[in-house]
Image (cartoon, rainbow, N blue to C red):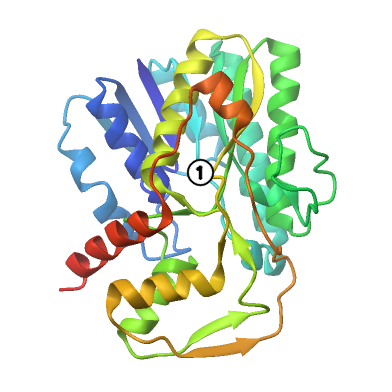
Amino acid sequence: MNILITGAAGFIGSHLCERCLESGHNIIALDNFNDYYAPSIKRKNIEKSLSYTAEYRLLEGDIRDKDFLQDIFAEQQIDLIVHLAAMAGVRPSIEKPELYYEINVMGTLNLLERCREAGIKKFVFASSSSVYGNNTKVPFEENDPVDHPISPYAASKKAGELICHTFHHLYDMSVACLRFFTVYGPRQRPDLAIIKFANLMKNGDPIPVFGDLNSSRDYTYIDDIIDGTVKAIDFVDKENCYDIFNLGESDTITLSRVIETLEENMNLKARIEKYPSQKGDVWQTYASLDKSKALLGYNPVTKFDEGIRRFINWFKEENR
């Protein structure tokens, strides 16, 4: 299958490209290498994929550029799209809401429009657990109301889900929206907690903690996320659907345990500086996986302690 993957040089995208290439798919990899974090990190992410010279084509450009996208869709034979490209992060979205709307909402619409024009009917959209906001009912289920986002980022992801549904309804597109729950592992974005904390600890700097150490997240190891995404690709390829799926671990981990586990694996003691809670941050995330297991056959297997061990092994290799 010929798969267009947007955000292909990012954390999740680069891992997904490798898995799809290993499975025999041809990959059209799209990324704009923006400076949200160092583009050199993204260049390094794709080194292995670039070795698949016949099956991997890298295209550099922006999903806001309609002419650029039209050229891609005119020149490439595309069977299915996995749309990962987005401006990420809750706190930065509060500072730059217009940018998040332009890329996450209008960029998604641009891709769906090009699909409509080209007659491409298979689309996987990367959403986020952020859409649940401060949902008090746990675990979070896909049919829970998600009408009260608490950050522009969360609102942009909910808007993306709605646009995807509209194109499914109007143009019979088969769509899976994947709500990722706090992904971690090798190549994690440098602004995310686990790698940020590890870097601070390595350098002897204090870890900033906003709010309560008892806040919790459903941390999900990258290999499990990739397994779920591949299963969603297969599902969309075979079914005429519009479905939303949680991809998490269904195991909540407190911030205090994150820090303790890093201390154990790095043999370092963390210094903590406490700050008030920040706007946009949720108290907890916790995924129900009943639907994903039933329809996708999704079955995460990497427990948090093992995931952190693997991450720290990679982190040490990277920082020799």
User: As rendered, which of 306 and 2 lies closer to the eye?
Assistant: 306
Tell me if residue 232 comes above or below residue 180 in the rendering: above
**Quadrant in which the N terminus appears:** top left
Report the number of numbered marks: 1
- In the rendered image, residue 294, in percent from the top left (x then y), is placed at 57, 21
Secondary-structure class at tag 1: loop
- In the rendered image, residue 62, in percent from the top left (x then y), is placed at 49, 44
User: As rendered, which of 318 and 7 lies closer to the eye?
Assistant: 318
User: As rendered, which of 86 and 278 lies closer to the eye?
Assistant: 278
Tell me if residue 103 comes above or below residue 244 in the rendering: below
- In the rendered image, residue 243, in percent from the top left (x then y), is placed at 66, 23
Q: Which residue position is annotated with label 1?
A: 85
Residue 90 in the figure: left or right of residue 170: left
Residue 228 in the figure: left or right of residue 320: right
Q: Is residue 191 visible?
A: no
Q: Residue at x 31, y 60 (%)?
A: 311
